[in-house]
Image: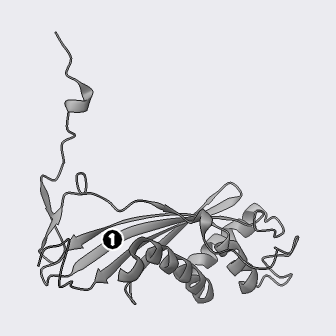
Amino acid sequence: MTRPDPRSIQSPSPRGAQSPSPRGAQTPDPYTAPRRPMVRAGAGRRPQAPPRRGRALFAADGRLDVDALHQVVELADAISEGLAYPMPDGGEQFLGSTALILDVEAAGLAPLCTEDLGRLARALTEDGRCRLVVRDRIYRELARLLGADTPERFDLEVTQRVEGVRVRLVGDFEAPLPRRAVTDGHA
């Protein structure tokens, strides 16, 4: 018995060719739809001043130093991806995600114990000041993907997890894109 060429086998889509969107519009099959290329933020903006070695992220009384948090978030490794789906009104809805890997020691701050890493992870999703820092960084990642099409508003849901001496944040975002008069050369 001869085996088929693996390159000729198409992976089946468990949902079929089209999947319904929350608003009733037909969206492309996520298994076959072309995606925008992933962006790695390694070439992104870096703080101007060199990091201050040994600075603590948490003060002696347990309060978080928000300026130090900015430093950690700015130096985080980031990977972003997303896909625009057509909407019934003629616009598009952009769905994507960004993973940020926060490494306190690589940012030049004093190392954190396991308990403090847990406190940091919780603060990133529960403390309003920290959420603003994370939202701003993820917005810039969204702008890397969309360029001039970056909307002013977007919905964001962030989850966190401690992985060894790092904290991983995953932000899933949804952003409405404006209707275009001309799309891909077609009126």
Q: Horizontal and vertical percent for residue 162?
A: 62, 61
Q: Is residue 17 left or right of residue 114?
A: left
Residue name at image x 17 percent, y 66 percent: 27
Q: In which image quadrant can residue 134 be found?
A: bottom right
Q: Horizontal and vertical percent for residue 123?
A: 63, 78
Q: Quadrant of the N terminus?
A: top left
Q: Quadrant of the C terminus?
A: bottom left
Q: Horizontal and vertical percent for residue 172?
A: 41, 70
Single out the residue that lies furthest toward the front.
185
Q: In which image quadrant can residue 112 be found?
A: bottom right
> At label 1, which amino acid type do we have?
Leu
Residue name at image x 20 percent, y 71 percent: 184
Q: Is residue 116 left or right of residue 179?
A: right
- Viewer-nearest residue: 98 or 122: 98
Classify 32 as above or below 102: above
Determine which residue is flagged by label 1. 95
Single out the residue that lies furthest toward the top.
1
- Viewer-nearest residue: 83 or 116: 83
CA neighbours of label 1 inside 10 A, class few (<14), some (14 to 19), many (20+):
some
Q: Is residue 106 left or right of residue 185?
A: right
Residue name at image x 76 percent, y 85 percent: 63
